[in-house]
Image: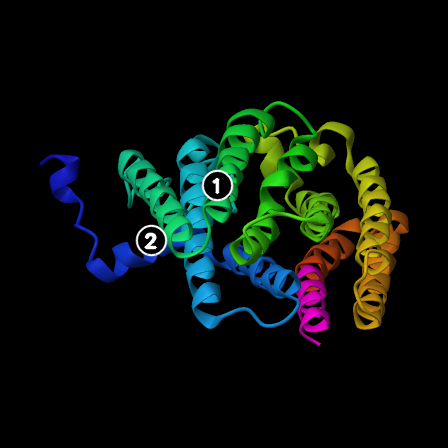
Amino acid sequence: MSTAAAEPVAAPPGLLRDLVTLTKPRIISLLLVTTVCAMFAAEQGVPGGWLILWTVVGGYLSAGGANTINQFVDRDIDAVMDRTDRRPIVAGRISPAAALAYGLGLVLASVLVLGFLTTWLAAALSFVGVLLYVGLYTLWLKRTTIHNIVIGGAAGAVPPLVGWAAVTGDLTFGAVLLFAIVFVWTPPHFWALALMLRKDYSQAGVPMLPVVYGEQATRTQVLLWTVVMLGTTLLPYAAGAGLLYLVGAIVLGVPFLWMAWQLWRGDTSRPWAALTFHYSLLYLALLFVVVAVDAAL
């Protein structure tokens, strides 16, 4: 009996679950927070409900398509990493060709949704984000340089630009500042994760910073980039954001700096790396909520 005949066909609920899994919804949720909150900042108030809805739908399709294509490209790496060896493509539940077609379809749908229902600038920026993530980061930088996260972080910083452009149809200095915040947040966030997953990255041959230069160098970079990030978060206040934003940025930033400091000086780096990584997720979400509330008020 052939292998294909012996394997059961995936039930529709299982297939649907795998299709959703390919899009990485937990990661997308944070991207959408930065997108929607940037819309509030661009509006200097509350944007229309339908505009928010279609921007969120388009943003999810775009990021989900990029994540799916990423897993198609990285299926060889995913197969040797404990964290990723159960993903749908690696596990054989979805074929690589089907996953690639699915990812491309999501990206195309996102361009149409954003273009026709928000603005074409938002659609173009979203597509640029896909190109940066798939072309610049996944296909080139990830496997070739320790600077993959620093340069490739531009892809994750695009969603605020998409949200801003969806409201205004253009980009101003405020949008650039929100882009910059996410851009400089990415290294301390991801290198804290890389410290936790150093063994996985080493097995897969991915030249992440802790694999190439060790944990101490990585901890130092996390601390330095956290300082840069905190300085960057003060720029919106200098550019006209309210006192509420300034207070929120400081209150949220001090614990991040303290964790990065403890990570740098501590002997037990892995627990501090985990704490820094998980707080960084909460930090970015809450900081952008503060941006939205400050703008709405």
- Is residue 285 shown in magenta? yes
Instruction: Name the residue at 80% across, 73% down.
Output: 244
Question: Residue 98, image x and y in percent?
Answer: 27, 39
Find the magenta span and give its range: 284-297
Classed neighbour count for the residue bearing mark 1: other residues with Cα under 10 Å, few (<14), some (14–19), many (≥20): some
Main SS of the magenta part reads helix
- In the displayed structure image, the side of residue 46 where residue 70 appears, left or right: left
Q: At numbered mark 2, what does the secondary structure look like: helix, strand or loop?
A: helix
Q: Looking at this view, is 170 or 89 the one in front?
A: 170
Q: Looking at this view, is 184 or 21 the one in front?
A: 184
Question: Residue 189, image x and y in percent?
Answer: 70, 49
Q: How many marks?
A: 2
Q: Which amino acid type is shown beneath numbered disc 1? A: Ala
Q: Is 285 above or below relative to 86?
A: below
Q: Is 142 above or below relative to 253?
A: above
**From this viewpoint, which residue is outermost toward the left?**
1
Q: At numbered mark 1, what does the secondary structure look like: helix, strand or loop?
A: helix
Residue at image mark 2: 18
Question: Residue 187, image x and y in percent?
Answer: 72, 43
- In the displayed structure image, the side of residue 103 where residue 59 appears, left or right: right
Instruction: Name the residue at 58% across, 27% down.
Output: 205
Question: Residue 42, image x and y in percent?
Answer: 63, 60
Residue at image mark 1: 124
Residue 202 position by quadrant: top right
